[in-house]
């Protein structure tokens, strides 16, 4: 039998809508950039999950760029996940490094982020800003 913690994790990682969070169906085409990671604190939950500065967030749990106010929805989702001790699947895009199997020198991967209290500020330990295209992208 699944424990309460496992059930909570399943509800976050499934397509089941969470209270207060608008879910959207995944687009059939490529994901549109949603936000960018501006900074990651060492030894934070974001650091432990493998998030890196300048990662482009394509999907944050059920939230995609089609959400009306994606950053506000992320702000609602994070404390819910922390309260349930659950992980959030995040699809990121980053510049590839030597040895990565890539498409046009861009790497897309999914990381599991578990928001939680830690020694620093917030529940994530990273700063997320709205996505704006730069000349290099």
Image (spheres, rainbow, N blue to C red):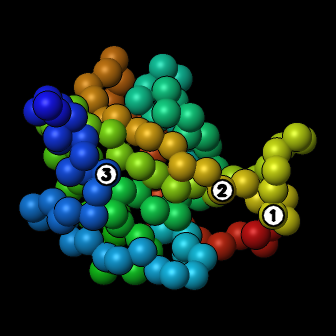
Q: Looking at the image, which is closer to me, 2 or 133?
A: 2
- Is the residue marked by circle 1 packed among few (<14), some (14-19), or many (20+) residues within 10 Å? few
- Marker disc for residue 34: none
User: In the image, residue 79 lies at what x, y percent?
Assistant: 19, 43
User: In the image, residue 133 lies at what x, y percent?
Assistant: 65, 73
Residue 35 appears in the figure: no
Q: Residue at x 57, y 82 (%)?
A: 29
Q: Which residue is drawn at 35% across and 46% down?
A: 88
Do the residues under discs 3 and 1 have CB atoms within 8 angstroms? no
Which is nearer the N-term, disc 2 or disc 3? 3
Which quadrant is home to the N terminus? top left
Question: Which secondary structure lies at badge 2?
Answer: strand
> In the image, 80: left or right of 33?
left
> In the image, 21: left or right of 72?
left
Question: Which secondary structure lies at badge 1?
Answer: loop
Mark count: 3
Do the residues under discs 1 and 2 have CB atoms within 8 angstroms? yes
Which is nearer the N-term, disc 1 or disc 2? 1
Q: Residue at x 31, y 21 (%)?
A: 118
Q: Name the residue under label 2.
A: 108
Question: Up-down: is 107 above or below 87?
Answer: below
- Marker disc for residue 103: 1
Do the residues under discs 2 and 3 have CB atoms within 8 angstroms? no
Discs 2/3, front: 3
Q: Mark 3 points at which residue?
A: 13
- Is the residue marked by circle 2 packed among few (<14), some (14-19), or many (20+) residues within 10 Å? some
Q: How far apart are marks 1 and 2 (CA)?
A: 9 Å
Residue 61 appears in the figure: yes
């Amino acid at each position: 039998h699944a424990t309460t913690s496992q059930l909570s994790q399943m509800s976050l990682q499934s397509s089941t809508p969470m209270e207060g969070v608008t879910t959207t169906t995944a687009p059939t085409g490529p994901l549109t950039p949603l936000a960018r990671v501006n900074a990651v604190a060492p030894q934070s939950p974001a650091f432990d999950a493998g998030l890196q500065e300048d990662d482009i967030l394509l999907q944050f749990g059920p939230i995609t760029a089609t959400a009306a106010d994606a950053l506000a929805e992320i702000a609602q989702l994070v404390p819910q996940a922390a309260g349930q001790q659950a992980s959030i699947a995040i699809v990121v895009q980053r510049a590839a490094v030597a040895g990565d199997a890539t498409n046009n020198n861009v790497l897309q991967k999914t990381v599991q982020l578990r928001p939680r209290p830690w020694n620093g500020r917030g529940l994530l330990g990273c700063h997320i800003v709205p996505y704006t295209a730069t000349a290099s992208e």
